[in-house]
Image (tube, rainbow, N blue to C red):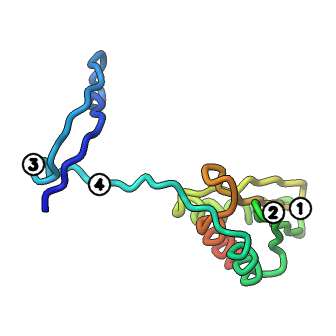
Amino acid sequence: MDVIFSLVLLTSPGVVGENLMTESISVAERPEVELVANALPVRLSDLEVQQRIEALPPAWTTDGTTLFFECTFGDFVEAIAFVNQLVAPAEALGHHPDITVNYNQVSLSLTTHDAGGLTELDFQLAEQISAL
């Protein structure tokens, strides 16, 4: 079965001054075109949030729409070293925590703004952060 869809084509990198255009194409005709799912994350129900928070270490709390984590380190250098470890898992998931550093204390909050609350992404990142 052939897939046909419409897309907006942008100019090639480095080409300036061309207009945008819409074109219907067949994937069979243009094999270099990849289908990419841009679906918004789905917000978890209150029950799902409660079940998922219970599976996380006690350092994680929630108000139902955001996950919170606080940790105190020996000094500022240790706190920043921890923050630096957050980069790889956050980038891998394409999901980033809000971070506050107060000398040796790091506070994180996770929510999926596009979904208006907590999604699977928040809990996946929380699990990875807990494993650090």
The local crowd at label 1, few if under 14, some if 14 to 19, many if 20 or more residues have their Cα within 10 Å, is some
Proximity of marks 1 and 2: CB atoms separated by less than 8 Å:
yes
Residue 35: assigned label: 4
How far is disc 4 from disc 2 in space, using C-alphas? 41 Å
Residue under the image location 89 percent in, 64 percent down: 75
The local crowd at label 2, few if under 14, some if 14 to 19, many if 20 or more residues have their Cα within 10 Å, is some
In the displayed structure, 127 sits above or below 20; it is: below
Task: Tell which tag, 2 or 3, sits nearer the viewer.
Answer: 3
Check disc 4 and give the amino acid type: Leu
Residue that carries the numbered disc 2 in the rendered image = 79
Q: 34 or 89, which lies in front?
A: 34
How far is disc 2 from disc 3 in space, using C-alphas? 53 Å
> Which of the two labelled residues, at mark 1 and mark 3, occupies the earlier sequence position?
3
Task: Tell which tag, 4 or 2, sits nearer the viewer.
Answer: 4
Residue under the image location 73 percent in, 70 percent down: 46
Task: Tell which tag, 1 or 3, sits nearer the viewer.
Answer: 3
> Which of the two labelled residues, at mark 4 and mark 2, occupies the earlier sequence position?
4
Residue under the image location 30 percent in, 25 percent down: 20
Mark 4 residue element: loop
Residue that carries the numbered disc 1 in the rendered image = 104
How far is disc 1 from disc 2 in space, using C-alphas? 5 Å
Residue 98 drawn at (x, y percent): 74, 53
Residue under the image location 72 percent in, 76 percent down: 47
- In screen coordinates, is 23 left or right of 127? left
Residue 29: assigned label: 3
**Would residue 92 be visible to someone looking at this image?**
yes
